[in-house]
Image (cartoon, helix red, strand yellow):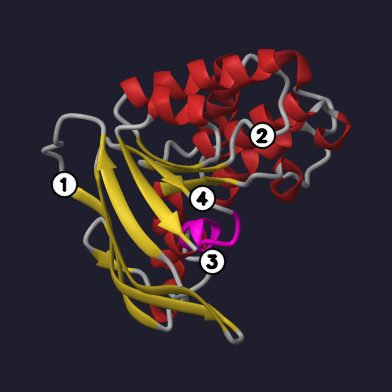
């Protein structure tokens, strides 16, 4: 069972509520992971999810991204209910996934194309964008993430830091309003960690809503507006 406490670290936001979970219950077989869980995240906030392994952080991230659904309770994203039924509607699902981007802890889990260019372009192809717009957005991402030299490389041949950049580019290319990050700097060397922290700070300054699950105290201190603490 998971208890929740919130410690504020920034001035109260005045934006609209982007993510709202009310009375959420979820379990795996006989193990209760979330029991009557509540959470609200406002537009433009950077919120840190902290707690021991197995406390429910990853489950909350999957719920937020519509990958699993609660047994009880309500999840509202930008004022709309996200349920198994609504996600079966192709138009709703496509619009939802355009608005929210999810960076997995293990970048290999979301990289599956033969070149970095194709990896970044995939989301736009699925959205039915014109070829000229796809090419421009891909170029923008290659420049923004400083990975232009990797454009023809196969993602599975890259270093951990390079893979993380490509995975990040593949979600940012759709310009999501909310970015979900699961342990985004774990497994990276110090140089790559610093680059990522600076990049996330730029996204924060640009007004993105960011949710980060992490054990890293430096990341939490440098980026977080609030912390949500999970207790096992």
Rounded to the nearest angstrom, the CA distance separating label 4 from label 1 is 26 Å
Q: Residue 20's spot in the image, x, y percent?
A: 26, 60
Instruction: Choose mark 4 or mark 3, whichever is in front.
Output: 3
Rendered residue at 71%/30% (across/down):
117
Few, some or many C-alpha atoms within 10 Å of disc 2 (few <14, some 14-19, many ≥20)?
A: some
Rendered residue at 83%/39% (across/down):
114
Rounded to the nearest angstrom, the CA distance separating label 3 from label 1 is 24 Å
Q: Residue furthest front?
A: 232
Chain part drawn in magenta: 53-61
> Which comes before the other along the chain, label 4 or label 3?
3
> Which comes before the other along the chain, label 3 or label 2?
3
Instruction: Choose mark 4 or mark 2, whichever is in front.
Output: 2
Q: Can residue 114 be seen?
A: yes
Q: How many marks?
A: 4
Q: Residue 83's spot in the image, x, y percent?
A: 39, 75
Instruction: Choose mark 3 or mark 2, whichever is in front.
Output: 2
Few, some or many C-alpha atoms within 10 Å of disc 3 (few <14, some 14-19, many ≥20)?
A: few
Few, some or many C-alpha atoms within 10 Å of disc 4 (few <14, some 14-19, many ≥20)?
A: few
Instruction: Choose mark 1 or mark 2, whichever is in front.
Output: 2
Instruction: Choose mark 4 or mark 1, whichever is in front.
Output: 1
Instruction: Find disc 4 in the rendering and name its residue.
Output: 127
Left or right: where does residue 166 sit relative to residue 28?
Answer: right
Instruction: Find disc 3 in the rendering and name its residue.
Output: 67
Tell which of 130 and 153 is nearer to you.
153
Left or right: where does residue 101 sit relative to residue 122?
Answer: left
Q: Residue 194's spot in the image, x, y percent?
A: 58, 15
Secondary structure of the residue carrying tag 4 is loop
Rounded to the nearest angstrom, the CA distance separating label 1 from label 2 is 31 Å
Rounded to the nearest angstrom, the CA distance separating label 4 from label 2 is 31 Å
Occupied quadrant, residue 210: top left
Instruction: Find disc 1 in the rendering and name its residue.
Output: 16
């Amino acid at each position: 069972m998971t208890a929740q406490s919130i410690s504020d670290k920034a001035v109260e936001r005045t934006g609209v509520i982007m993510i709202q979970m009310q009375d959420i219950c979820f379990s795996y077989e006989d193990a209760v992971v979330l029991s009557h869980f509540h959470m609200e995240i406002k537009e433009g906030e950077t919120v840190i999810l902290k707690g021991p392994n197995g406390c429910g952080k990853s489950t909350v991230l999957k719920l937020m991204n519509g990958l699993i659904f609660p047994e009880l309770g309500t999840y509202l994203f930008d004022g709309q209910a996200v349920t198994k039924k609504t996600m079966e509607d192709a138009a709703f699902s496509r619009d939802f996934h355009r608005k929210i981007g999810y960076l997995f802890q293990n970048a290999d889990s979301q990289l599956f194309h033969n070149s970095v260019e194709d990896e970044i372009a995939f989301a736009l192809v699925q959205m039915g964008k014109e070829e000229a717009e796809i090419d421009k957005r891909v170029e923008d991402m290659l420049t923004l993430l400083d990975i232009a030299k990797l454009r023809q490389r196969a993602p599975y041949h890259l270093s951990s830091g390079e893979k993380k950049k490509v995975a990040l580019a593949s979600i940012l290319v759709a310009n999501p309003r909310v970015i979900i990050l699961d342990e985004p700097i774990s497994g990276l060397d110090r140089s790559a960690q610093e680059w990522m922290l600076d990049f996330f700070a730029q996204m924060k300054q640009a007004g993105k809503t960011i949710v980060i699950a992490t054990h890293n105290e430096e990341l939490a201190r440098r980026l977080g507006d609030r912390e949500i603490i999970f207790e096992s």
